[in-house]
Amino acid sequence: MNVVIVDTNVIITANDEAEHASPDCVERCQKRIKQILDQYETSLVDDGWRILNEYKRYVNLETRKGIGDLFVKTLLQNLMRQPAICTMVRINPLDGSDTNFDEFPVTEALSDFDVADRKFIAVAVAYEQVYGEKATILQALDRKWEPFQKALEQEGLQIDFLCPVENEV
């Protein structure tokens, strides 16, 4: 089974609420979310609820209008009961921080990586350390990841840019 970490912008795009997302990009994000909902892929989140709390800020759990809304609601409902849908991974914050983690690679090439997105990297690293297999980070429209693609790959991280044309800097 494939394991993935879904960046919040994938959920926003799947809900068709992202500015500048092409219909093709929206469709690709929706398809990946559906794969998780259909249990072809497992979504990973952190044990401190940093990722889930970020998701909750960008969806409407009451209406479930979009597939991104349904995705987050499904994760919350199945967090402890259905590890095939969602698995929680322990990451270790440095000095009580919610942005710096022991698992985040300490390299000069990643020193300027967006601190708000470091939790996604930390979960991928922690998952591989515990389970011995790689998780893929799903990324849609966040252009801040592009300059770090090679450095992330050199650290053994797998990033799937679902909207590569729109991601170009």
Image (cartoon, rainbow, N blue to C red):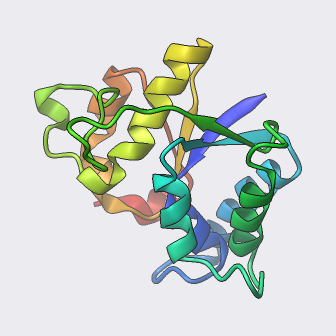
Residue 27 in sight here: no
Residue 143, x across and y down, in percent: 33, 60
Residue shown at the point (26%, 43%) measured from the top left: 96
Residue 133, x across and y down, in percent: 61, 17
In the displayed structure image, the side of residue 65 where residue 120 appears, left or right: left
Which quarter of the rendered picture does the N terminus lie within?
Answer: top right
Instruction: Name the residue nearer the viewer: 99 or 159.
Output: 99
In the image, residue 96 above or below residue 58: above
Residue shown at the point (84%, 43%) measured from the top left: 81
Residue furthest to the top: 132
In the image, residue 58 above or below residue 117: below
Residue 47 in sight here: yes
In terms of image quadrants, where is residue 28?
A: bottom right
Residue shown at the point (66%, 77%) measured from the top left: 15
In the displayed structure image, the side of residue 8 where residue 103 appears, left or right: left
In the image, residue 72 above or below residue 21: above
Residue furthest to the left: 108
Residue 84, x across and y down, in percent: 82, 37
In the displayed structure image, the side of residue 38 where residue 115 appears, left or right: left
Which quarter of the rendered picture does the C terminus lie within?
Answer: bottom left
In the image, residue 49 above or below residue 13: above
Residue 12, x across and y down, in percent: 56, 73
